Image: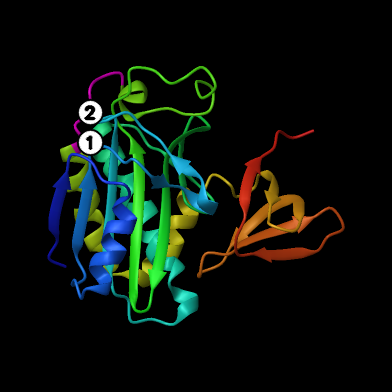
């Protein structure tokens, strides 16, 4: 895929910008990066806030011609590609947390958010790259590439590696679920899944090829979960 990168000092939301461009007919491969977002969005409508220049805030426009239940594979591909880019550039191996987060030492390193409109799919990522410190309320919950690597990490280098890896995975989508599952730290863990109308507790025992998480509850049932927030619980 040929990527066209547009880099802005500030945007309200890279995902919002790309969705608007998609409605105007922009081709797949348009990439938007912002040094700062004034209204960045995380999953389930949460705000995504980062100081200017501290994070790689990037969205990629895709136009996948696949069945609706296959769309999540593109988000999985982006998560794997971002983990590989961090490994290549920063020199440590982040884990994936279901459905779309990157972790280092159980601290959140990145989050991804996919949004669709008609045949357009926008996959956004916010990766903490170069932070001096986190606010006290986030210090035990979040981390950044430079803090894990013990040295400065360049956002441009991570972006280049991310797009190269994403391109490779888009060319071999059938191989993505296995690699996603291999990196998925949620598997084998006791989890609490918080959904809009329910809370499910059990052990994450597998992941399907279309991104669903399989959870074995205490009564032995295996439930396929397609959405929700996951908390990794301590055993015992």
Crowding near the residue tagged with mark 1, few <14, some 14–19, many ≥20 C-alpha atoms within 10 Å: some
Residue 224, compared with residue 50, is above or below; it is: below
* Residue 154 lies in the magenta-colored region: yes
Q: Residue at x 40, y 69 (%)?
A: 116
Q: Which image quadrant for residue 57?
A: top left
Q: Secondary structure at mark 2?
A: loop
- Of residues 133 and 211, the one nearer the viewer is 133
Predominant secondary structure, magenta span: loop
Task: Give the colour scheme of this rendering.
Answer: rainbow
Give the residue at mark 2: 153
Give the residue at mark 1: 89
Could you say where residue 180 lies in the image, as x and y percent from the top left?
Answer: 44, 56
- Of residues 43 and 218, the one nearer the viewer is 43
* Mark positioned earlier in the residue sequence (2 or 1): 1
Q: Is residue 22 left or right of residue 192?
A: left
Which image quarter holds the N terminus?
A: bottom left
* Residue 188 lies in the magenta-colored region: no
* Disc 2/disc 1 C-alpha distance (Å): 7 Å
Could you say where residue 105 lies in the image, as x and y percent from the top left?
Answer: 49, 29
Q: Residue at x 62, y 47 (%)?
A: 230
Crowding near the residue tagged with mark 2, few <14, some 14–19, many ≥20 C-alpha atoms within 10 Å: many
Marks 2, 1: nearer the viewer: 2
Q: Is residue 194 visible?
A: yes
- Of residues 216 and 200, the one nearer the viewer is 200
């Amino acid at each position: 895929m040929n990527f066209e990168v547009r880099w802005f000092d500030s945007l309200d939301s890279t995902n919002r910008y790309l969705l608007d461009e998609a409605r105007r007919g922009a081709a797949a491969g348009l990439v938007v990066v912002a040094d700062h977002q004034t209204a960045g969005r995380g999953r389930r409508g949460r705000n995504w806030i980062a100081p200017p220049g501290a994070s790689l805030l990037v969205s990629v426009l895709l136009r996948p011609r696949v069945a609706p239940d296959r769309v999540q594979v593109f988000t999985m591909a982006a998560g794997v590609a971002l983990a590989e880019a961090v490994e290549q550039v920063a020199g440590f191996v982040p884990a994936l947390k279901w459905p779309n987060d990157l972790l280092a030492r159980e601290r959140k390193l990145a989050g991804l958010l996919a949004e669709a409109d008609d045949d357009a799919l926008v996959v956004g990522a916010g990766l903490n790259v170069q932070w001096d410190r986190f606010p006290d309320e986030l210090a035990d919950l979040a981390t950044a590439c430079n803090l894990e690597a013990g040295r400065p990490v360049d956002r441009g280098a991570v972006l280049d590696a991310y797009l190269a890896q994403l391109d490779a995975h888009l060319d071999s989508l059938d191989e993505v679920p296995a690699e996603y599952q291999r990196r998925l730290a949620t598997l084998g863990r006791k989890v609490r899944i918080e959904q809009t109308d329910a809370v499910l507790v059990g052990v994450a025992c597998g992941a399907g090829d279309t991104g669903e998480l399989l959870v074995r509850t205490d009564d032995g049932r295996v439930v396929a979960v397609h959405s929700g927030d996951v908390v990794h619980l301590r055993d015992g």
